[in-house]
Image (cartoon, grey):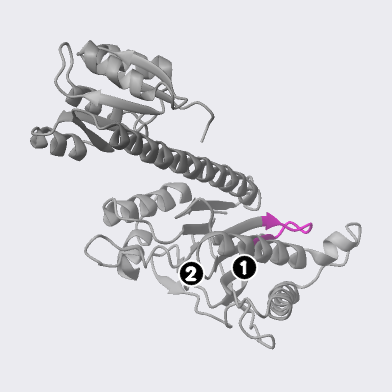
Amino acid sequence: MKNTPRILIVDDEPFNVDYLEQELEDLHYEIITAFNGQEALEKIQTGNPDLILLDIMMPVMDGYAVLEKVKADEDLRNIPIIIISANNDLQSVVKGIEMGAEDYLPKPFEPAILQARISSSLERKYLRDLEQMHLKSLQREMDIARRIQKEFLPAEIPTLPGWQVAAYFKAANNVAGDFYDVFTLPDGNLVFVIGDVCGKGIGAALFMTLYRSLIRATATSNDLTDPSSQISLPPEERLKHAAAFTNLYVTTTHADTFTFATTFMGLFDVNTGMLYYINAGNEPPHLRRGDGTHETLMPTGPALGVFSDAKFTVRQIQMGQGDTLTAFTDGIPDGKNPRDEFFGHDRLNHLLAQDHPTLEDCLNQIGDHLLAFMEDGEQFDDITMLAVRRVG
């Protein structure tokens, strides 16, 4: 508690004010006074009191109006207010407490009760102030974590002739367990990754950065080792290497944690339109053909981080002009409204079957529909989508 707590006495009776000042003068408090509600609000704004002793029945503005205004102000609401009330005015006391007053003092004042009420209220304020300082410190740390984590997502989406790429990302909390990545290789081909780390909060966010970094590093390992080399890994080997190395690293180095990630990794040959992919336990991406038909790319192996000896099969599929691949995490089909109804795959597939001018329009419309479906309900999971369309 700070050395000299400041107490504001608000009462229209000078006798009461003088009496309270006399009782408090030996207790090392700094006293300020106001004789009506309007003056009290001015003193609260300028005097920054630690405690308010508030009379109810006053001219100009009564104690209820002061209570209402103070408790409605984000910066003032935590100042404890003790109602000054006559013993027989219990209705006023109850109303004041319901409006947010901390305690009450009966008239006439009993010195021991007066001191006890003030001391306990100041102690509670001190503890609340400590709590608020701690929460603000945590929020600053979370803001830093969010900014750092954001750097692990692509700053911009690659632009390729004949191709459109778009992403949609909305974290459920300050930090996310979902991740996505899109980048081009030295040979011009496109790598496309989306994943969902199990769990929530800081733990999932830390592993999100690990998975994303490992996948990008291993998917480009030969290029990073010797950028001038003309040797390029075949797509199948590149994807298998990225999946196998990431999986082995997590299952051996972090075996005690058991934090896995459902992941879809795709490599597009931008010249031929061939897509090579591994679906490691992720939601099956939706492939909509230019003629309106659609397919789903089912898992080809388990989630990363589960089995150290897991095998990941690379499959391939031809992307034709007008074909669109949309990958997503389970935060979309598992989104719930207040009636515990799931958004589901049918609603998602219906939206994906519609024509949209751009991929951004498509993903934004899905996101808008999902948030509207949730009806202001809590977003329990991250919402992440990544789409690629061949246009040339």
Mark with earlier residue (2, 1): 1
In the foreground, 225 or 160: 225
Q: Three-letter amino acid code at disc 1? A: Gly
Vertical side of 259 occupied by 129: above or below: above
**Disc number placed over residue 266 in the picture, else none:** 1
Q: Three-letter amino acid code at disc 2? A: Pro
Vertical side of 183 occupied by 47: above or below: above
Quadrant in the picture for residue 105: top left
Q: Residue at x 9, y 32 (%)?
A: 89
**Residue 190 location in percent, x, y?**
67, 59
- Using the numbered discs, state the Cα–Cα distance from disc 2 to disc 1 in whole angstroms: 11 Å
CB atoms of marks 2 and 1 within 8 Å: yes
In the foreground, 224 or 261: 261
**Disc number placed over residue 285 in the picture, else none:** 2
Q: Residue at x 45, y 74 (%)?
A: 296
Which element type, helix, strand or loop, lies under badge 2? loop
**Disc number placed over residue 181 in the picture, else none:** none
In the foreground, 172 or 31: 31
Bounds of the magenta span? 183-191
Quadrant in the picture for residue 265: bottom right
190 is within the stretch colored magenta: yes
**Residue 356 location in percent, x, y?**
39, 50
**Residue 376 location in percent, x, y?**
29, 50
Going by the image, does 23 lie left or right of 229?
Answer: left
Quadrant in the picture for residue 128: top left
Which element type, helix, strand or loop, lies under badge 1? strand
